């Protein structure tokens, strides 16, 4: 969100720029690549913010409509699994799970949510992995493409928002309100 507000021409002196927290903005990224190297980072708070990075060298040509979130950083593993928790092949979407040195131990004073989200890692016995709720797929070049959420959580200006919680609050105001639907609107890259 902050990157979208910047005048990219004023960033000419930066050799590299890292963005994270939300999907990379294609237009601004293309603009910046004239001046420096761009890093698209991905990772939820539960994995110390950064779990993957994709590097685009200065002058790179962006031919696709999305920017991959890259590959796992050192000491981090990413698994893309189907609904039965089986690994999916490249090109097939599934839920992303993260494990490794940056993984949190769980949620403070919330054992139920911890048990739901921090599950045993069948690929490295004795370790945990985090269910991100994010969809992704491995691309042929070994990078990951982010595909969205499996639930109704959205990110606006880097903040996680559960749309269902907003619906519940609206419904709690009055018995006269029977139904509520919350949606995200995007106007020129600015979500509300």
Image (cartoon, rainbow, N blue to C red):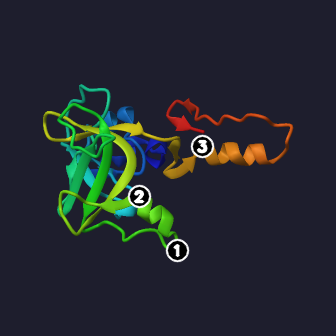
Residue 53 against residue 75 in the figure, above or below: above
> Badge 3: few (under 14), some or many (20 or more) residues near its Cα, within 10 Å?
some
User: Residue 16 appears at what percent x and percent y?
Assistant: 26, 51
Q: Give whichever of 157, 18 is nearer the camera.
A: 157
> Badge 1: few (under 14), some or many (20 or more) residues near its Cα, within 10 Å?
few
Q: Secondary structure at mark 3?
A: helix
Residue 15 visible (yes or no):
no
* Residue under pointer 2: 117
- Residue pushed farthest bottom? 109
- Residue pushed farthest left? 141
Mark closest to the chain's N terminus, 3 or 1: 1
The structure residue drawn at horizontal position 52% and vertical position 74%, both measured from the top left corner, is 109
* Residue under pointer 3: 163
Quadrant placement of the C terminus: top right
Mark closest to the chain's N terminus, 2 or 1: 1
Q: Give the quarter of the image for residue 64.
A: top left
Residue 132 visible (yes or no):
yes
Q: Secondary structure at mark 2?
A: helix
Q: Give whichever of 158, 99 is nearer the camera.
A: 99
Q: Is residue 116 left or right of residue 154?
A: left
Q: Give whichever of 180, 56 is nearer the camera.
A: 180
- Residue at mark 2 to residue at mark 1: CA–CA distance: 14 Å
- Residue at mark 3 to residue at mark 1: CA–CA distance: 24 Å
Residue 109 disc label: 1
Q: Is residue 53 left or right of residue 20?
A: left
Q: Secondary structure at mark 1?
A: loop
The structure residue drawn at horizontal position 14% and vertical position 41%, both measured from the top left corner, is 142
User: Residue 7 appears at what percent x and percent y?
Assistant: 43, 42
> Badge 2: few (under 14), some or many (20 or more) residues near its Cα, within 10 Å?
some
- Residue at mark 2 to residue at mark 3: CA–CA distance: 19 Å
* Numbered disc in front, either 3 or 1: 1
């Amino acid at each position: 969100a902050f990157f979208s507000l910047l005048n990219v021409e004023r960033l000419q002196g930066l050799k590299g720029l890292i963005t994270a927290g939300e999907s990379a903005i294609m237009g601004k990224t293309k603009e910046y690549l004239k001046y420096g190297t761009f890093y698209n980072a991905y990772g939820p708070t539960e994995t110390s913010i950064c779990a993957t990075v994709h590097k685009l060298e200065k002058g790179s040509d962006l031919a696709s409509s999305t920017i991959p979130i890259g590959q796992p950083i050192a000491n981090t593993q990413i698994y893309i699994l189907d609904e039965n928790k089986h690994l999916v092949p490249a090109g097939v979407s599934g839920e992303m799970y993260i494990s490794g040195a940056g993984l949190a131990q769980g949620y403070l004073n919330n054992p139920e949510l911890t048990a739901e989200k921090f599950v045993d890692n069948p690929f490295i016995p004795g370790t945990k992995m985090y269910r991100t709720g994010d969809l992704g797929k491995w691309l042929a070049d070994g990078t990951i493409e982010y595909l969205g959420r499996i639930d109704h959580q959205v990110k606006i200006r880097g903040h996680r928002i559960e749309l269902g919680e907003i619906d519940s609050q609206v419904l709690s105001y009055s018995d006269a309100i029977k139904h509520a639907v919350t949606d995200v609107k995007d106007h020129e890259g600015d979500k509300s």
